[in-house]
Amino acid sequence: MIISRQQFRNKLETVKQVLREHLLYAQQVTDRLAAHLDFHQDVQELQQLRSNLAQGRFEIVVVGEFSTGKSTFINALIGRKVLPSKAQPTTATINYIRHAKENPHGTEEAIVFFEKGHSEHVPFQQLEQYVTEMSTLFSVVDEISHVDLYVDSPYLEDGVVIVDTPGMQSLHKKHDEITRKQIAVSNASIFLFNINHAATRTEFMFISEIQKSLDRIFFVANRCDEVDISEQSVESVVASIEGKLQHNDFFKVKSGYANVYPVSAAKALYQRIGGELATEKEHVDAARYGQFEEKLWTYLTQGEKAREMLVQPLQRMSLFYEKLLNGLEEKMQLLRGELNVDELRDSIERLQQQIETRRMALSDEKERLHLELRALKDRFRSDFEAEAQAVTDDLKRESHIQHIDDYEEFREQILSHIRTAYTGCVEQASERFKERLASLVLKYTDRFDDELVGQFGSWQGQIGRQLELRSFKQRHSAELERLKQEQKEVLQEIAAAQGLQDEFTETVSAYHHDDLLEQRRQREEELHQTRYKMTLHQLNETPQYVEEVQKREREGIIGWFKNKFVGPEEVPIRVKNEDRKSLQETMQALEHKYDATMKELDIRKKAPGLSAEEAQRRILAAEQKENQLKEQYKALRNEITRKMMQINEDQLKLLTREIENAITTAGHQVIRSYDSIITALHGEHMVNYAFDMHIRQHDQEIVEMNARIQEHEALIHINKQKQDELLGLLSELHSELSGKTEELQALQAQLA
């Protein structure tokens, strides 16, 4: 539990307990005094005050551009992954996140409220289809009004409500209005930056529109875990963002409000849902989130709203006791004989005479006041016109645009800035008019309170509602289009010249290729001839026949004995030479191989149509053509650049005039609307009401005094014993009430 939050919770419980005890006592006292003093209405109002205290709210608005990690930041606050968080833009509607016990069903769920009036109960698992731009079921921006999320989270106890907004540049203008209103009435707002891309123009423009709430806005730089600390420290990045907040072209935030708190919502959430952080840096990044929470809750629980929440019920209780004591003292004085009823009647008669005299005088004063009111309107008109002109001059000084893309991207924001500036002028002027009128009324009446303030009207018009800024896209001159077409044609000619170079280079390459093939052909032919001649020489040197010894059996008896004892007879014979046959086959193989090689080389020859010399000449010509075209292209490009700069300069002048015209138009609207603004404030009605109320107030005093006289007469006519008993009761209660009052005053001093 955050220390400052726990301390506040303890104080709140103390106030609730004290209030319960004092309300019980007040009820007992009013019951005992019911016959003499009627304070039951006061007690009922105090009971309602106690109920309001129990339902106290701490509203925290979270706003930020896409990629700031807004959904992850809120998930870290509540300690759970409830809102969808992805790399794409997500939130497309307003989400109010409350504790589950505030749900009439007492359960965790989301209730989706549609623009057409119906609602739907949705589990968290399906939430993405109802709150994000990625929904495939609905056009979330157009069909869904808002979503109430009921989550069982300790962070949402004590009436904490987190308002998740679609942020800046919402797709629905209604969302922008709701976001600004929520920021204006919230206890605190958190403005998220992406620490890696902080302080963008859109962010500055939005800050300028909510500048009245800067005292309740915390600037937070999320994703500090992504800072490369080897290049720069988190503190140096934060200092840079703070510097940009204080020095920019849109709205300069005062140094006291420009503090930026670095956090890592991702690391904090990971740790809070049970994840283990691995490095010391991750622990440091996660700890920064807790440090920011402590600062936020210190502000929430020690701010004016928190003190008012704690002290106001005690002050109201003290006022009740004071009123009760005054009533008791008057009754006691009467019973002691210190008050004279006849004197009271004389006082009433004198008061009636004074009122009649005053009523006649008021008629003249009322007429004088109306004359002064008309004079005030005339004086105020000149002041108002001067202020409107000053706003016009300031806006024109701020309207410098450096590039047309800036204008096209921020057209709607520029219009919104113009409207906001003039609306602020009207609001401030209206408040000053009310203050001056209040000062006039106080000269003639003796009060100017909330009831009188409530008689003021408010101007409901919209400054610059019909304002438009034209788009200046696609406004190119015919000459620029001609230059661009010519540039395109030159590029095509350059490509053609490069194609010719490639073609002729291929021709030269083909000749070189064929030369290599011819050289190989010659080598193959020489090798073939050498091998063939060598083989032919061997063939010629090889005889066709060779002699061999053949063994043959002898015939006859003698031949038989010789065959048996000497062996067969060896007879020389002539046979064909097998080596010659082998050489002939080798020669045939050489012929076949040679023919195949020659055929392959013939096939591989490219046989170009141009000679190598002609192709080389054409390559040089194409290169010269390409160089000429490139020079022409360069000249065209320079001419186009010059022309575009001229056009851009002309367009910048046009759009600057466009913005200035819009500013001037809005300024004229403001000045022309002066009479309707003053009429809407109901000044005459408020003056009449003030005088009528003044008279009614004194009439009521007479009625109340008559009632008191009747009560006093009733007391005087009771017997002495009852008077003494009543006096004793009143004295006892007076003493008790004095003690109770001191007790409350001591507690108020402690809480202040």
Image (cartoon, rainbow, N blue to C red):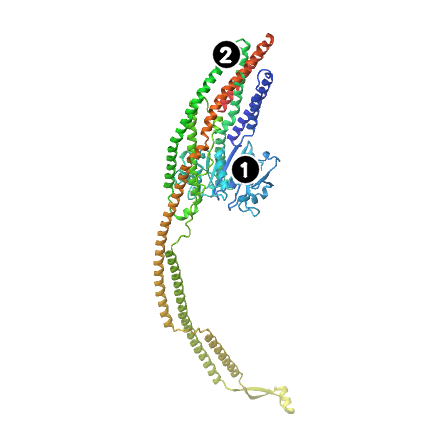
Foreground residue among 388 and 444: 444
Please tell me which residue is depicted at 44% across the width and 78% down the height of the picture: 525
Check residue 96 in the rendering and tell me which mark sits there, or answer none: 1
Foreground residue among 300 and 341: 341
Query: Mark 2: which amino acid?
Result: Asp
In this rendering, the answer to whether 305 lies above or below 609 is above
Across and down, in percent, residue 391 comes to: 38, 37
Check residue 306 in the rendering and tell me which mark sits there, or answer none: none
**Residue labelled with disc 2:** 346
In this rendering, the answer to whether 637 lies above or below 203 is below
Q: Circle 2 — which element?
A: helix
Judge the density around disc 2: few (<14), some (14-19), many (≥20) Cα neighbours within 10 Å.
few
Whether residue 229 is visible? no
Query: Mark 1: which amino acid?
Result: Tyr
Please tell me which residue is depicted at 35% across the width and 52% down the height of the picture: 646
**Quadrant of residue 530 in the image?**
bottom left
**Residue placed farthest to the top in the image?**
720
Q: Nearer the viewer, mark 1 or mark 2?
A: 2
Foreground residue among 608 and 348: 348
Please tell me which residue is depicted at 56% across the width and 88% down the height of the picture: 572
In this rendering, the answer to whether 638 lies above or below 15 is below
Horizontal side of 413 relative to 646 (left or right) equals right
Query: Could you give the CA–CA distance between mark 1 and mark 2, rounded to whole angstroms?
Result: 62 Å
Judge the density around disc 1: few (<14), some (14-19), many (≥20) Cα neighbours within 10 Å.
many
Mark 1 or 2, nearer chain start: 1
